[in-house]
Image (cartoon, helix red, strand yellow):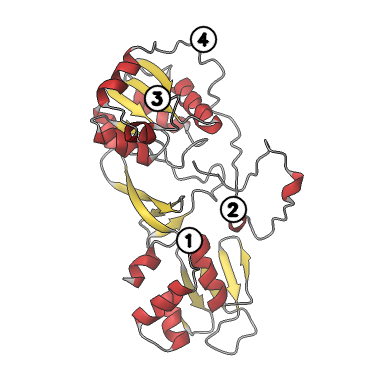
Amino acid sequence: MYTFLLSSMWEADFHLALGQMVPGGFWQDDFYFAPCPLHDDHDYSLQYVRSTRTWRCESGCGDGDLVALGVRLWRCGIEEAAARVLALCGDDCCHVVSRYPYLDVNGQFLFEVLRFKPKGFDTRIPIQWKWHDIARCRPGEEQLGLYRLPEVMMAYDVLIVEGEKDCETARGIGLVATCNVGGSSRWNAEYVNYFHGKRVQIVADADMSGRRHAREIAGSLLPVAESVKLIEFSDVKDLTEWVEAGGTFEELTGMFSNTPALSPSEVEGWWDPLRTIRLQCEADFLLESHTILDPTSLGADQSLEVGDHLE
């Protein structure tokens, strides 16, 4: 039970335990170096790898995950060690509430997105279940993927929303829906070719980043799709909230039927495939170790190129 909880722990909570079990270290990119607590160490022999959540002592004390370290450090069994590690993660830990698998066009598993409560996201790719934090990746390094891609390939009518939760809501009322991994500001030119000849319907999240994201998608797809329509709900933020408030399949299809398809002149300037992506970060633990930031120096409309605040 405890080991299952730790396998899907939010990164910031997990690092609270790491800092208490292996104090006195420092971060360098994705690696944490510290004196090994298993022997008298003055050489920072222990190395912890963020992406795989594993440690290794260069002096030969061993390797493994934090539970394995706890077994040796506290001289106890696996379940007790896991419980003690979990206790070090804080009183209000984030936990996984949904898992969203991403597949390629042939239906082969690529990676999964984890949704946490309180709200947060991570991705894991199946190389030793390597963790890949989509809020930390830099332009050119991001994980690419469209949710439910095999279904998109087979469909003529496709609904595009901002997140996986809305995709599942759409599927629940009988629609084929997709989104790109990572949420707003992460639409990629590589996705465009999957929509040749399709009738595309887009629901924009009712906020500034959601509208910008939906416009980018519409602008990129209009040259290849048969038609592109875009709507936004006036009284709720997204599709899930709209359906929870009583919205139905018939009402949604009626809204799109009454919405004219976008024209080339309307979407001019909405999409720039060569744009520089500026990502936002609201969590201190996402900053690189060498970054020094005075929050008061940033205006309300400025952003940081160190991560993305995911809607």
Does the image show residue 230? Answer: yes
Q: CA distance from mark 4 to mark 3?
A: 18 Å
Give percent across and percent down for residue 73: 47, 85
Q: Residues within 10 Å of mark 2 (few under 14, many from 20)?
A: few
**Residue behind mark 4:** 265
Q: Which residue corresponds to the image point at 56% horizontal and 42% vertical from the top-left? A: 139
Give percent across and percent down for residue 284: 62, 56
Q: CA distance from mark 3 to mark 1?
A: 34 Å
**Residue behind mark 1:** 51
Q: Nearer the viewer, mark 3 or mark 1?
A: 3
Q: Earlier in the sequence, mark 4 or mark 3?
A: 3
Q: Secondary structure at mark 4?
A: loop
Q: Which residue corresponds to the image point at 60% horizontal and 43% vertical from the top-left? A: 280
Task: Tell me whether the residue at label 2 lies in contact with that at label 4, contact meaning CB atoms closer than 8 angstroms.
Answer: no
**Residue behind mark 2:** 283
Q: Which residue corresponds to the image point at 59% horizontal and 90% vertical from the top-left? A: 40
Identify residue type, mark 2.
Ala
Q: Nearer the viewer, mark 1 or mark 2?
A: 2
Does the image show residue 64? Answer: no
Vertical side of 245 occupied by 15: above or below = below
Identify residue type, mark 1.
Ser
Q: CA distance from mark 3 to mark 2?
A: 30 Å
**Residue behind mark 3:** 202
Vertical side of 285 occupied by 113: above or below = above
Q: Earlier in the sequence, mark 1 or mark 2?
A: 1
Q: Secondary structure at mark 3?
A: strand
Q: Earlier in the sequence, mark 2 or mark 4?
A: 4
Q: CA distance from mark 2 to mark 4?
A: 39 Å
Task: Tell me whether the residue at label 3 lies in contact with that at label 1, contact meaning CB atoms closer than 8 angstroms.
Answer: no
Q: Which residue corresponds to the image point at 72% horizontal and 56% vertical from the top-left? A: 292
Identify residue type, mark 3.
Ile
